[in-house]
Amino acid sequence: MAPGDGGARHPKKGRRVLCQGVKAKYVFMQAHREEFRVCAMCRVLRVNRAGYDAWLKSPDSERAKEDERLLGLIKHHWLASGSVYGHRKIAKDLRDLGERCSRHRVHRLMRADGLRAQVGYGRKPRFHGGMPCKAAANLLDRQFDVTEPDTAWASDFTFIRTHEGWMYLAVVIDLFSRQVVGWAMRDRADTELVVQALLSAVWRRKPSAGCLVHSDQGSVYTSDDWRSFLVSHGLVCSMSRRGNCHDNAPVESFFGLLKRERIRRRIYPTKDAARAEVFDDIEMFYNPQRRHGSTGNLSPVEFERRYAQRGS
């Protein structure tokens, strides 16, 4: 369609508009009314001239204005989550602010604006198993629904890619609130890595004697140093059955979120950059903000705060 004539050839800039809604086509026509004849654009875009004229005379509907306002809030919460939240969690954020909107409406607005939850990719290096003769009993036995804080913890570690080489992250998670109560990073997947993570958890939470610490049967968890640390701090050792990742599902779930939403989206330029990103995700987002299905869609910190209020 050449400017000023009635040809039927599609304008190059308007090809994508053909697949959009009527309002988007009206907006396109208004923006290009000096380049193309209105009647030609109506024919190419398959819209009614009377409808276009009526649209020019009427202001935006209240619904459209409200959608625009909600989209601004949606973008704010999507960016605040590191671009990882989907429409369900953002809808809950908005309802917490007192907004009256369904998750279906949030989904529609996010889809129209190209906002979506992040997904990642798979692959991890292999780690060595421990000695079966040193494995502890599976005392936790998949009893992940804990009724009090600091009565059962779970630990594991994973890898992070950087251009300077591998980094390894070990965490300790309180099964009550799913809060990461201790973590450590090193460039070696050794016993010191997991002991440092557990030490940070003990220092931060100061659990009573008898707190259960669950892990897999990896070599770092069957080591003498790990066992000695547990005994010296009054902690009780529990281990998954050999080769059964579901026995430590909460930590596997946490690592799945971390990798899908953060780590797998890039290879970090330096080890310090990876450490800074992990700190930001755990301490600034996951613990205080990220909603968790097992805690009634509350963040770990908020879940513990409400528990403390009920007990006071």
Image: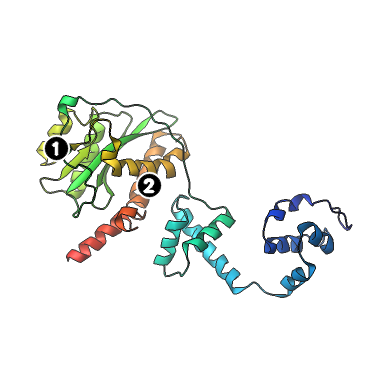
Q: Is residue 116 visible?
A: yes
Label count reads 2
Using the image as rendered, state which of residue 95 and residue 286 is in the foreground. Answer: 95
Identify which residue is drawn at 79% across, 62% down: 42
Could you classify mark 1 by the number of other residues whose Cα lies within 10 Å: few (under 14), some (14-19), or many (20 or more)? many
Q: Which residue is mark 2?
A: 281
Q: Is residue 262 visible?
A: no
Q: Is residue 289 left or right of residue 20?
A: left
Q: Position of residue 126 (x, y in %)?
A: 35, 26
Q: Amino acid at mark 2?
A: Asp
Q: Position of residue 21 (x, y in %)?
A: 67, 60
Kindly report the distance in space between the C-alpha atoms of the residues bearing marks 1 and 2. Answer: 28 Å
Q: Which residue is mark 1?
A: 230
Using the image as rendered, state which of residue 185 and residue 42 is in the foreground. Answer: 42
Q: Position of residue 296 (x, y in %)?
A: 32, 58
**Against 95, is 199 above or below?**
above
Quadrant containing the C terminus is bottom left
Using the image as rendered, state which of residue 12 and residue 238 is in the foreground. Answer: 238
Q: Amino acid at mark 1?
A: Leu
